[in-house]
Image: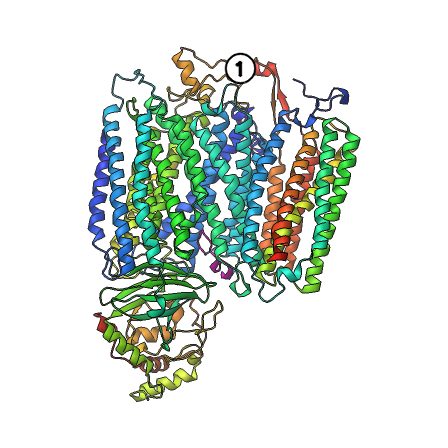
Amino acid sequence: MSHDHSIDPKSMPKDPSKATTEGKHKFMGLWIFLGGETVLFACLFGTYLALRNSNAGGPTTQELYGLGLVFLMTVLLLTSSLTSVYAIYHMKNNDFKKMQLWMGITALLGIGFLACEIYEFAHYIHGYGFTFRSSAFGSSFYALVGFHGGHVAFGLSWIITLMVRNAKRGLDLYNAPKFNTFALYWHFIDVVWVFIFTVVYLMGMVS
Amino acid sequence: MGMTSAQKRGFGATLWDWLTTVDHKKIGILYLAGGGFFFLLGGLEAVIIRIQLMSPENNFISAGLYNEMITMHGTTMIFLAAMPILLGLMNFIMPLQIGARDVAFPFLNSLGFWLFLFGGVLLNLSWFTGAPDAGWTNYAPLSIQSPGHGIDFYIMGLQLSGAGTLMGGINFIVTIVLMRAPGMTYMRMPLFTWTTFVASILILFAFPALTVGLFLMMFDRMFGSAFFDAALGGNAVIWQHLFWIFGHPEVYILILPVFGVFSEVFPTFAKKRLFGYTAMVFATFLIAFLGFMVWAHHMFTVGLGPVANSIFAVATMAIAVPTGIKIFNWLFTLWGGSIKINTAMLWSLAFIPSFTIGGMTGVMLASAVADYQYHDSYFVIGHFHYVIVGGTVFGILAGLHYWWPKMFGKYLHEGLGQISFWTFFVGFHLTFFIQHFLGLMGMPRRYWVFLENQGLDTGNLISSIGAFFMSFGVIVFLINIIYTTIKGKKAPRDAWGSGRTLEWTISSPPVHYNFKQLPLVRGLDPLWIEKTEGNEKMTPAEPVDEIHMPNGSILPLIMTIGFTIASYGFIYQTGNKYWLIAVYSGIAIALICMLTRSLKDDHGHHISKEELERVGD
Amino acid sequence: MRGWMGKTKVFFVFLLLASFLAGCGIENLTALEPKGYGAEKSMDLIILTTLIMTGVFIVVMVIYVITLVRFRRKKGQEDYVPKQVEGNHKLEVIWTVIPIILVLVIAVPTVLATFDLSDDSKADELINVNVKGNQYWWHFEYAGEEIQTSQDLYIPTGERVYLHMLSSDVIHSFWVPSISGKMDVNAENVNTMYIEAYDEGVYWGKCAELCGPSHSLMDFKVIAVSPDEYDEWVNDMQNVDTDAEPENAVAQEGQELFEANNCMNCHATDSAASGIEAGPQNNGPFGPNLTNFGDRSRVAGILEHNKENLVDWIMDPESIKPGNKMTGQYPELSQDEAESIAEYLLQLKPSEITPESAGD
């Protein structure tokens, strides 16, 4: 049993994120956590669906949503999910530099998404006076989309911390699982967005 | 290491050891102590309620205070007493039962405990400025309109302790899936481990609904959103749905682990293997699964319509089937056995009739039209106390008496145990049986006073007298703990002589790494198998080698303090924006802790082969 | 041995006690003596489920007692190791199938009754009352009749009366145990239920959903009178002479004080007073309608109906119903003034039909 986590890169195993028990625990722990997160978002979706027509005289979903920006956001986030897959691919081959590169691109795309979202919210608030407080619809919209945005922001600070922290020392058995769990989390955020795109925006445009 | 050497060190070092511990056994004991403290508080609140209701139109406490009392009694007992005590038992026992040296995430385990404790303390600090007063179910819009900060304390306190519980749940799931000893297949796991596993799954899927509900309520009360505000199109029934989507599985989170306890106690003291093990496992899963499909039976009178009411009524009745399977399996575990009756067994035996009554009234309540009468009356109070006291509390006490020698190395005193059992048992039935009738005689729940000449006097008096019996039983139990700590009889490994599972193969109390060598499990009831084959010990699955253990850390405690400061800030920033300083600084403290944890590598420590051989096992 | 004997004794005592108390609830309050359609339907199911469940309980207890008697470890048996039984398929099938059958036996009548009690297909042809729950009083508006009352709901016996219920503040729950099970009164949607009383009588109603400090004091009455009496009452209430002079000088002074002290802001003395409509907002009335106050069965829903209690209420409602919305809404009154107002209110008796007509 070797306890030296920063072993020679040449002898690193094929998938360093799953080589230690801690790594396996973390990966599974995050999967389980995402199960809970699913319920969390399901409840927010339920609340939104129940309240989306309670606009108390304010703008309706059709008046509010515009597909252009939301489409751009979807492209940004979906692409970032793909780039994180590349990053993990390189991580599994112990190619730290390429992993950092693709993680960096992932983070940039995430920042782009978040910027669009902030712009979108600002637009609703200043353009339509549609706020968190203006109606039950407003509350449920900002709660659902905002919770997702909060998750994106958390994910971004997570990956940036990880990248900065490990920039100099490279990949080892101790930090590889951390990158792997981040990637899993990031995919989850992406999946939630697909549902938001469909349930909130597409269905909002139609009904 | 371990408790013995801790005692030799100074007080400061011991305290530091407990504040920084990531050892699942110590965290288990902390949970038991914390939960026990809140249990006493909740019990005191219950006694005050029963004194108020001892006679008609009583003025012992005011109407406002009474509402605070019932709210805090319910909230405390469910979130701060019953659940943490169960988490304590799970924490201590489950890793031993699967032959593990710790849980999967020791750091998170510690964080979960501190979050629970500080959440509970925060909630109880509300007593100084006005406690929450909208019932433990906290229905909007009453809770939205409640003046003062009571409800805010409820929101933040439960949010903190709920986050802690969720961490515990995730931790246990991963531990059970990944950390079982060699040979411990799923279908060889002890029932208590199974129920811990299933209860953890329930925690995982149920608590987020409460989290969302609490967030929405927090936003409505603190930031002017309109989720529950009918004037802006909000809908207060959403709170009820979210609360019960969490709340009903919560009932099973409370009851399934003690089903596990009884499934350990009965075979041990009947010297007979659990009857229908496979059926018991599947019944547990079935109960958990159905537990998510029935939340609206708490809402039959909300006006959901006959279709919804019928579906939820039938789904609820269906739960009686797996529960019945369990009751009969326990009975037939005892049948043909060699039954030894001691305090642990008394609590378990008393559970069967008590819980059966709770189950009976449960089916009665499931009949929607009959529920139109029972709902929100004392019938419901009687019902769920039969389930939660007759089930959960009896189970906790059975488990404590059963595992006390394992946890502390000493037997609880048998005579004192029996006194506390009989007084509590009699008091329990006196208090709650009559309440079914009070409900049907027209007494709604959460009534500060009942009027004279409504035929409710005698029943309420009997109920109050019962509460005093129960209090007496609890006090005797406390005396028992003190007596045992000072003069208790020492327990060997296999404390009851007829242990069947892995926790009885190691010393009482266990060393901090639990197993010097991980055992090889050859079937269900591994110790029993070895005993029947004449072996004194388990066969080890590995040679003696150095053991990797996690390091203690003070970060969970500091992080929790940060969250608590932030919560306090959230509560008071509605009146004075300077409190936002507390919000930001609290969150900053928590974030710095997270960052420290993230940036500073923690590889744990190793116990050398030499030390292991010196200590023995 | 003493263990289980003690336990069975305890249970026996409980059973006795229970059956003794079961007949003990007071008439027209207890759900155990149903006097209306809903309560009867509920009671049928209560009895059915109790019987079945008691049967189950007896089976469990018989096995339980036999097990404990026969298989308790006796002296000298310390080393005896019982046979390790894994399970028994036949038995396990039995205790899975039989409960399923029992559940079905309960489920079918439950579903039928659930649909039965929510049937509102004939509501249009019958009496409809808009009920408004308020902290801590009830308001009743008879749809299409231009009649409003508070606290006492008059209904004819033997007829379904549809209640359309809405809350002006928090959730309440309308419960008249002897006539019908309860239904919540929400702020955002109208809930409909019907009640039907078989016999004449004054039935106790309770609020069954925690609604604030005085939740336990939010009592009301359902007064079931014969259909003829009900028609007479409707007629009387529709033809209240609002200009009638109070009968004596004290009452006249009371009326002036009533008008001078903001009482009219919230309280109407005219049954037909408009201003109430269904909707989530609290659009009034803000206080109980007092048209037939003299005939109320209780002061504030809970106190005996006499002048002394009414004066106490007017002087200091907070001491009687903590958290009520009347406290502080009017200038402080002297004892004399309160007595005059009470005198005035107690002679508001527009109808011959009173709780006494229902046998109270």
Q: How many marks?
A: 1
Q: Indicate the position of residue B535 as horizontal and vertical percent values.
A: 43, 11
- In which quadrant of the rendered view does residue C334 lie? bottom left
> Per the image, is B474 magenta?
no
Residue A67: % across, % down: 69, 55
Residue segment shown in magenta = B134-147
Q: Does residue B581 appear left or right of residue B357 in this picture?
A: right
Of the 4 image quadrants, the one containing the N terminus of chain B is: top right
List the residue tagged with mark 1: B541
Q: Amino acid at mark 1?
A: Ala
Q: Nearer the viewer, residue B349 or C149?
A: C149
Instruction: Work out whether residue B354 can be spotted.
Output: yes
Residue at coordinates 59% horizontally, 39% vertically from top-left?
A34
- Image vertical order of residue A11 relative to residue B202, above or below: above
- Residue B536 image point, x, y percent: 43, 12
Give the vertical position of A89 relative to C316 (above or below).
above
- Report helix, strand or loop for mark 1: loop
Mark 1: give few (<14), some (14-19) or many (20+) Cα within 10 Å: some
Is B324 above or below relative to B533? below
Q: Is residue A165 left or right of residue A51?
A: right
- The secondary structure that dominates the magenta segment is loop
- Res B36 visible: no
Check the residue under mark 1 and report the chain it is in.
Answer: B
Which color mode does the image show? Answer: rainbow
Measured as percent of width and height from the top left, residue C48 is found at 26, 47
Q: Is residue B49 left or right of residue A89?
A: left
